[in-house]
Amino acid sequence: MDDNVLIIEAGRTEKQYFRDLWRYRELFVFLAWRDILVRYKQTVFGVLWAIVRPLMTMVVFTIVFGKIAKMPSGGVPYPILVFTAMLPWQFFASSFSESSNSLIGNSNLLTKIYFPRMIMPASSIVVAFVDFLVAFVVLAGLMVYYGFTPGWTVLTLPVFILLAFMTAMGAGLFIAALNVKFRDFKHLVPFVVQFGLYISPVGFSTQIVPEKWQILYSLNPMVGVIDGFRWAILGQPLNVAAFFFSMAVAIGLMILGIWFFRMTEKTFADDI
């Protein structure tokens, strides 16, 4: 029998689900590349949107928190303080939004062929990562403009990018699964993103939060991600206990998202 033949039998896909994620990697690449082309091909708006959105937010937050409220910046130019936080936040917000709507947006595929459905939310995050890389070039330009040079801690940046991915993926899988059965959840996503922007330390430093509340504040996993970015790029102080607590929440959210997604995945084709 040909080794490349996929045999569909009761329970088989359950036993090799995560192996199938690798076997269907070409579908993952195709979906990710398709979304990137839709965003960037034959248009400058996709690139501009990846730059203008965090840049305008940075300007507003710098004026409100830096100029008017006079929030401390730890000796770092306030625009850099804000933009360093906007990078992971924008990556999370875009990843969460795209992944939570990925199943509904690809409903035609869900009802026709078998493949691990987790590929859809995961592939949608690739576009957000491309936006992240584009915006990172802007941050580099800001640091050159202000004459700010990062230290060796910048080498740890991939760890915090991975943490942002886990947070977005966990939340995205959970809402994506709910969104298939209850379409009202698509209206929850913009609210979560907007509300989260203001309760996360994007426009200000976590140092203004009283130390006794920092662990509680770290229930928001993006607090640890943003503080990690600022530590890695700017050398800002990092509350280690609060960071690891925030990291534990992110890992727990990822596990919960995968568990709930897998539990409800069998009925996607019927509910779509």
Image: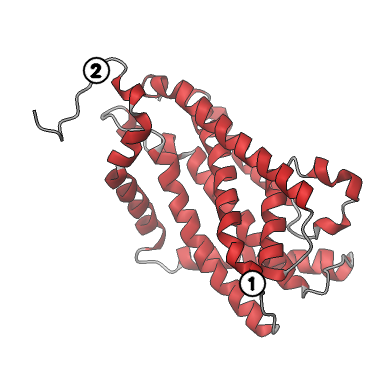
Which residue, given by chain and number where applicable, does mark 1 sit on? 152
The residue at the point 42 percent across, 24 percent down is 265
Amino acid type, callout 1: Trp
The residue at the point 79 percent across, 54 percent down is 239
Where is residue 187? Give x, y as percent: 59, 36
Amino acid type, callout 2: Glu
- Colouring mode (rainbow / by chain / secondary structure / one colour): secondary structure
Q: Element at badge 1?
A: helix
Determine if residue 134 is in view: yes
- Quadrant position of residue 20: top left
Comparing marks 2 and 1, which lies closer to the viewer?
1
Q: Is residue 48 left or right of residue 205?
A: left
Q: Tell me the distance, in whole angstroms, between the alpha carbons under discs 2 and 1.
A: 52 Å
The residue at the point 57 percent across, 29 percent down is 184
Where is residue 208? Give x, y as percent: 88, 57
Q: Which numbered dot is residue 189?
A: none
Where is residue 243? Give x, y as percent: 73, 49
Determine if residue 199 is in view: no
Tell which of 151 and 66 is nearer to you.
151
Q: Residue furthest top?
A: 10
Q: Element at badge 2?
A: loop
- Quadrant position of residue 9: top left
Which residue, given by chain and number where applicable, does mark 2 sit on? 9
Q: Is residue 133 left or right of residue 240?
A: left
